[in-house]
Image: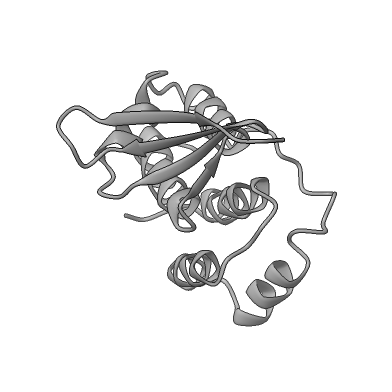
Amino acid sequence: MNIPLIDRSNYLKGLFITAKLDKELSTKEKDILKKISDKLGFANDFFQESIRCLLTNNYINEEPIIFSNEEIARSFLNDALKLACANDLVTEAEIVWLKNTAKANNLNNKFIENELKSLELSIFCIVTLHCEMKISPSLKNPVVNIKRVSS
C-alpha cells in the first residue's frame, strides 16, 4: 500500500497515542512500534527520541486521527489494536480512543469490537479502576468473564 507522507506521520503518531494511553510501554510494544516505524520510513534517531519521552510528553494531541482513505484507516486500526493487545492489557481509554478514531474515519461503530473478537489471544481489559474483564476471542462465541478487583 502506498501511504502519503501525512498519513504515514499520522499513522505513527496514532500508534504512539495508543501505546501511551495505558501509561506503560512494554518491550513488546516498543518492538511493534519500531517495526512499523521502519516500514513507514522514519529515521531510527527520531524513533528512539520519540520512545524515550513518549510517556512524559504532555503535548501530544490525542484527538482521533483522520486518514485520507478508509483502507489506510482500517490498516491503522488493525495495527493499533494489535499494539494495544501486545501487553495483554487493553484499557478503556485505548478502546474509547480507537472507537473515536474509527468513527472519525466513517467506519462502522462495531469495527473495533469485531476486530478485537477476531484477534487470536486473550485480552485483559480494565473496564474501570475496580473491574477486570477477561475476553477470550479465539472461541466462536467469545467468553467474557468480569470480576471485581479491590481498589
Which of 76 and 132 lies nearest the eye of the viewer? Answer: 132
**At x 45% / y 71%, what residue is drawn?**
35
Q: Quadrant of the C terminus?
A: top right
**At x 62% / y 55%, what residue is drawn?**
16
Residue 66 appears in view: no
- Residue furthest to the left: 140
**At x 52% / y 64%, what residue is drawn?**
29
- Residue furthest to the front: 150
Residue 133 rendering spot, x and y as whole percentages = 47, 33
Which of 16 and 84 lies nearest the eye of the viewer? Answer: 84
| Scheme of image coloration | one colour
Residue 79 rendering spot, x and y as whole percentages = 41, 51
- 115 to the left or right of 68: left
Vertical arrangement, residue 116 with respect to residue 31, above or below? above
Vertical arrangement, residue 6 with respect to residue 54, above or below? above
- Residue furthest to the top: 109
Which of 2 and 124 lies nearest the eye of the viewer? Answer: 124
Residue 53 rendering spot, x and y as whole percentages = 78, 66
Vertical arrangement, residue 135 with respect to residue 120, above or below? above
Which of 82 and 150 lies nearest the eye of the viewer? Answer: 150
- 71 to the left or right of 105: left
Residue 141 rendering spot, x and y as whole percentages = 19, 27
**At x 63% / y 62%, what residue is drawn?**
25
- 113 to the left or right of 47: left
Q: Quadrant of residue 111?
A: top left
Q: Quadrant of the N terminus?
A: bottom left
Residue 109 appears in view: yes
Q: Quadrant of residue 48?
A: bottom right
